[in-house]
Amino acid sequence: MLNKNIETFIGCGAEYDAASLVISGAPFDSTTSYRPGARFAPAAIRHESYGLETYSPYQRRDITEFSVFDSGDMELQFGAPSAALSDIEGRTAEILSDGKIPFLVGGEHLVTLGAVAAAVKKYPSLHIIQFDAHADLRDDYLGARLSHACVMRRCCDLTGDSRIHQFCIRSGDKSEFAFAERHTDMHPFGFDKLFETAAALREKNTPVYLTVDLDCLDPSSFPGTGTPEAGGVSFNELLEAILEVCGANIVGADINELSPMLDQSGASTALACKIMRETLIAILKNK
Amino acid sequence: MLNKNIETFIGCGAEYDAASLVISGAPFDSTTSYRPGARFAPAAIRHESYGLETYSPYQRRDITEFSVFDSGDMELQFGAPSAALSDIEGRTAEILSDGKIPFLVGGEHLVTLGAVAAAVKKYPSLHIIQFDAHADLRDDYLGARLSHACVMRRCCDLTGDSRIHQFCIRSGDKSEFAFAERHTDMHPFGFDKLFETAAALREKNTPVYLTVDLDCLDPSSFPGTGTPEAGGVSFNELLEAILEVCGANIVGADINELSPMLDQSGASTALACKIMRETLIAILKNK
Amino acid sequence: MLNKNIETFIGCGAEYDAASLVISGAPFDSTTSYRPGARFAPAAIRHESYGLETYSPYQRRDITEFSVFDSGDMELQFGAPSAALSDIEGRTAEILSDGKIPFLVGGEHLVTLGAVAAAVKKYPSLHIIQFDAHADLRDDYLGARLSHACVMRRCCDLTGDSRIHQFCIRSGDKSEFAFAERHTDMHPFGFDKLFETAAALREKNTPVYLTVDLDCLDPSSFPGTGTPEAGGVSFNELLEAILEVCGANIVGADINELSPMLDQSGASTALACKIMRETLIAILKNK
Amino acid sequence: MLNKNIETFIGCGAEYDAASLVISGAPFDSTTSYRPGARFAPAAIRHESYGLETYSPYQRRDITEFSVFDSGDMELQFGAPSAALSDIEGRTAEILSDGKIPFLVGGEHLVTLGAVAAAVKKYPSLHIIQFDAHADLRDDYLGARLSHACVMRRCCDLTGDSRIHQFCIRSGDKSEFAFAERHTDMHPFGFDKLFETAAALREKNTPVYLTVDLDCLDPSSFPGTGTPEAGGVSFNELLEAILEVCGANIVGADINELSPMLDQSGASTALACKIMRETLIAILKNK
Amino acid sequence: MLNKNIETFIGCGAEYDAASLVISGAPFDSTTSYRPGARFAPAAIRHESYGLETYSPYQRRDITEFSVFDSGDMELQFGAPSAALSDIEGRTAEILSDGKIPFLVGGEHLVTLGAVAAAVKKYPSLHIIQFDAHADLRDDYLGARLSHACVMRRCCDLTGDSRIHQFCIRSGDKSEFAFAERHTDMHPFGFDKLFETAAALREKNTPVYLTVDLDCLDPSSFPGTGTPEAGGVSFNELLEAILEVCGANIVGADINELSPMLDQSGASTALACKIMRETLIAILKNK
Amino acid sequence: MLNKNIETFIGCGAEYDAASLVISGAPFDSTTSYRPGARFAPAAIRHESYGLETYSPYQRRDITEFSVFDSGDMELQFGAPSAALSDIEGRTAEILSDGKIPFLVGGEHLVTLGAVAAAVKKYPSLHIIQFDAHADLRDDYLGARLSHACVMRRCCDLTGDSRIHQFCIRSGDKSEFAFAERHTDMHPFGFDKLFETAAALREKNTPVYLTVDLDCLDPSSFPGTGTPEAGGVSFNELLEAILEVCGANIVGADINELSPMLDQSGASTALACKIMRETLIAILKNK
């Protein structure tokens, strides 16, 4: 008898109960102010992951050594950021309460807020490490407070000051940089002080949420994103940074802002798959 | 001394006070459930209109014979359908109260609701003629009542039964077709009864709002739209229908659902420009 | 507890045992001589089918009224036509022996040979109805006898003369047209005599395999195919033809030769989804 | 010993001396006012012609039955219309003086002027049949008299009044349509009176130059052109018109305005190849 | 009352009289010998600049602190390089005579010649700094002396020897490199000696015209150009070089050779916008 | 009299007898497991090479100083790897036996096996230098032993252990890396030990076959390939490595895995042309 057609990220075919990490897709991009399309990322990443191997020559580990469950995409209401965030928070809370690590695949960067809201409830001392081209620290954007351009500001509302460590930032208005000076730990342009930051968090076993806005990469490596911002980091730099950070106590993570249709060569989607494989292995091998 | 760089739809350079028709762009597509991008249509149409002539050999009139003002695009909040509709209604009401005809360029089809809300206040006996592949008659879509998939249902809430004349419809769920049988005047697939309908409205001088969802066209003519639905009408059929309908008392109109990035040949945008030129001339020559 | 991520063609979520029709993807295009890419069609059709409704206003039936199982894609060896055809024949035979109708989604047209090989064993009096721009009647192509350009010639080897009814053919070398005069029932360019052919088969309850090479369509409607051939039929003509043919005793069917990456507007894939929905409903409502 | 790599249009491998028709590419598009790219057409047509068969089921003839020489592309100076036209006129005159039929592959429509200049010198009673969306009858365009938008006006300067028969025209400014009424034989929109016109020319054995601006086709069939103009003819209509016209005494011909990069599906280039094959056979079978 | 739709580069909304710098678009690419499309760059840059912020974290300045006027695009005659250059020289001279800095946005690189012709009249001791992959030093190209491939040779005719400082050059024929040894100051491949060159010019307060052919960048960062040439500089290297050069006395500048349609991800256009913002701020903050 | 249209790689117009190097295209990609299209590379490289100069400023030599013959593309049977390899081996053997250097342009990487099979017969002590993202060391792939994923394993069968020097490898399954430890000389990720390896081969005058899978490059430089793998080398690094290796006794070479349609900017094809020009010059200047 023939089997049903199950689609997962490559090598992530575990059952829910056995899994130590759970992938969820958040195909939402309604507040994207420029070029939408991040909604297509979770399905594209899952589908294109089969162009990858399961083995990482960087970490000399294979993702099939670990138990990962891929729960597919959430059905989120377009045009209703508040409802969408509530759904994301709900699923994330369920995964956390089952003792598993939630791994979210955006979607626009706003989706991070739903996952962080759940994580900070379980881990009140949560720190956030953000890799991103944009500060995302506006208090509102065209009047909206739930916008991709405000997501880290809203996270800061939840975590309090000095808990968000921002790297690779090279775009924002003047007020966002001013806010960062007072409220976050911002390292503009690249990964300056990344190793020190990671080491400090690791030593104290601080619970860390890692959010990777893939536009932290230079558009030469990653053109498939809504707001490409020249002057970013290379794939090798990002990989090294992720491996370093995952030595800390990662309690949740996401990657976001791939817009697959904007890079019809497929190279951006393939890179996102590879970053995801490496991040999953790095988180899991350290548990 | 050099001049500022003013961009309008071709041949539409009148001053506001002198104009009998006013163009407004509504670059909104936040509730689009499938492939977004209609937000880019107003700017693309304005820009690409310069590949057209101002003269219509079909109507043997030139758009420069009339006075049209192009007010540019509204700045609408992404992810906030209610606020966006309110802004559209406001601008439409202003234009109507100045005795001019509002002509809206979407954006997704939901934007029509803002314009109709203003029009029905001024013209309580308003009828609507809709050219569209999709019925757009759901009561809600994934829980949202302000969605492109519900826009004509919401218009029906405003106009009451039997005031909406639907043509070219070839997609919807079973309940939408059932609703249409009881509440609207639906003519599926093509323009069957279009001439009779237009004639009846013309005779009674009924105020008519014309909404053209460009996906009424067959995707062979118009692939540049979020949800292409095979089996539609040709350009010549649509042109003939518009010329016929514009013999009635048109008090407002829109075209919507062009998604320019989805047709990189530019043919869909060029067609939208031509339909817009012909519609503008047809409305204005009958005033 | 969260569920696994199951992907099917829209509305085709039945269990295997309950199903009367079984969908299989055949992502194979190794003998394509011009532009490959049909291998991506089954996954694209399944994924993009969610832009459709399950309800057909043409047939006033909903695909959810029937029981269809989607078995996903076969894992076929690239560069090995003989092995791939053997795998397709094996799966088709299994479905037929369980009393269900096999519905194959190519891939290049060669995949039809595997399904026909199984069907003709169960139904020795099998006829084939082929909609196609190309005759596909070469005895070999650059020395290969298992090639997309030879597929109907190989089918003819299995069924014997006068059993293949070819429509829409408008390309081939001189020898193929000569072969057709002696061995097949060819109707070039369009659907001339389609209704008579279908009626005759229906009357005798002849078992019929329907193979739809989507390049029978005019490239204006369906540019997303490896060898677009101008002068084909329209969507409405193809739909009407399929509805007519499905009144006969269809024992197996396929659609093939969509190459999704060649039409980046998505209109070709959307059309293929719609033709597939209509064909599934038409086959099943007549059982 | 290995052979040199010779590229010709499919089936056109004759030697120059033996040939009755000579193909020349004119990769020029410097006066294109909107979207350039027609310069790439001759190479693309030659290359993609191998997706076609040499056999025409429409005419039941094979292009290999005739002797055609493909002389490759001329090296024309970009940005220098006058020099480019002089080169085209020179090569055309050489072909004509050798008693062969020149067949030009544009490039933008301006290239026709070079070929017509040579043809009208040999055949002072030359008539021109033009299939085109645009009248091309301006006296100047932004000050330039050698522009694609003026090409038929310049031809009219050479042939005199009433010698140019224009079909499918659906774009131009008011003055061009006025000029046509006095000086050319214009049939707007389609092929109305085409058969009568062709019959009259055939009866008198008038020497005819046929110029096919492929944008006469509807953009649904032919999106790959710089200025797509909705409302054109279908492939089948154009084919029928060409077969009819080629019954007259064709002394030279061209096809132009394919811009291959604008239709990345390849369907426009494939159509141009097919029209070229059919035109070549139709001209040659009537000699 | 509604306002007219004015389009400018982001943050450049000053009145002409108040402005110290004036932007002009030069949408000309008629001599492009390979892939045209640079004509679309000025409109694309203006439009896409709204994906940027007005604030530069690199220079910690905001473009709105300065007064820039955007005069829109010149209407240049295609196919007539001499006329186009004359128009560019005229507008540049007007801006210079009003005591403002002209900033030209190409178009192909030939447009620089018009601006330099005006600048060298006002500043006879003018030096030029050129960032470019190509030497552009041919005396003629296929017979044309006004060609993108000859532009710096023509500039050298105007400035005299040793006044042109060429960086990043990695393409040319043998004779161009030989010419450079005798007549220009060429630094192949990268920015070797850039700082020394800029320092020397700054010390003497030499008037400098800066021309940035964006293909100086590596195609990984900037694929959207007609003749991509591997082996170029990175965005960060180019940015640093521009900031350095703008410490000198810049009296005019341009960026050119973006061809937006060739990079459909939008990353090339976004990079051009960012380089333009940084260059504008760098020039203006040093005045 | 007009000439036939001969197409060669730029500057490679020598006669066969005079040539010291012979280019052959191998347009084959039937075993490509992911995204096909490498079959289009040889024609694209030949066509687009005219955007390059013949002069190399890196080596200060011009390709026209050498004698290269371009024999065009082989006509290889799709779907029949064994037959295709046999044809490639045959042509390569012919070139080698005439005392010339064979230079193959793929196609997928499997084509290398045909050329190596011929080379190892003439040069039993042959070593291979491979630049590649993928190890290509599987014993079979989905059951096939003649697959792009197995090509270096098959080469290893021919050369014996320790003769294959692999650089830039960053993808493979665990077993491939284990095989490499025992049987090949693998240097993962980059060009570590490249200079030492080249020096040792040069000193012993070992016959070397150089195979460049262009996906060794980072996808930022080279997105136009079927399986882009982030983390590769830059153009400048690859160029330097090739110049170094070509100091050894190169007896045959190939470049492969460009898939031109996947990078519609043309930058990948342009880079492949430039790498080919530099490799040709580097091989020939050292003879």
Image (cartoon, coloured by chain):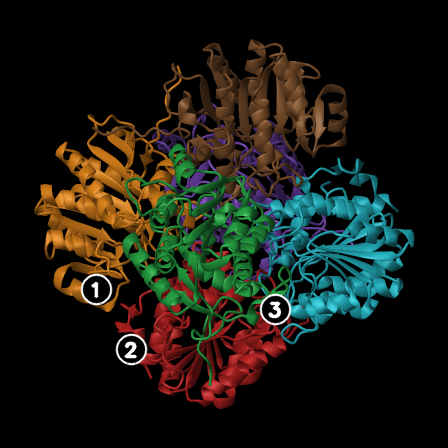
Chain colours: A brown, B purple, C orange, D red, E cyan, F green
Residue A80, can we see it? Answer: no
Closer to the chain start, of discs 3 and 2, is 3
- Position of the C terminus of chain C by quadrant: top left
Cα separation between marks 3 and 1? 45 Å
**Pointer 1 chain:** C
Q: Amino acid at mark 3?
A: Thr
Q: Which residue is mark 1?
A: C176
Of residues A9 and B243, the one drawn nearer to the viewer in this rendering: A9
Q: Which residue is mark 2?
A: D65
Residue E51, can we see it? Answer: yes
3 and 1 marks on the same chain: no
- Label 2 neighbour load within 10 Å: few <14, some 14-19, many 20+: some
Task: Give above or below for F199 relative to C70.
Answer: below
Q: Which residue is mark 3?
A: D31
Task: Give above or below for B187 relative to D148.
Answer: above
Could you tell me residue F240's position as x and y percent? 59, 52
Task: Give above or below for C184 relative to B261.
Answer: below
Q: Amino acid at mark 2?
A: Glu
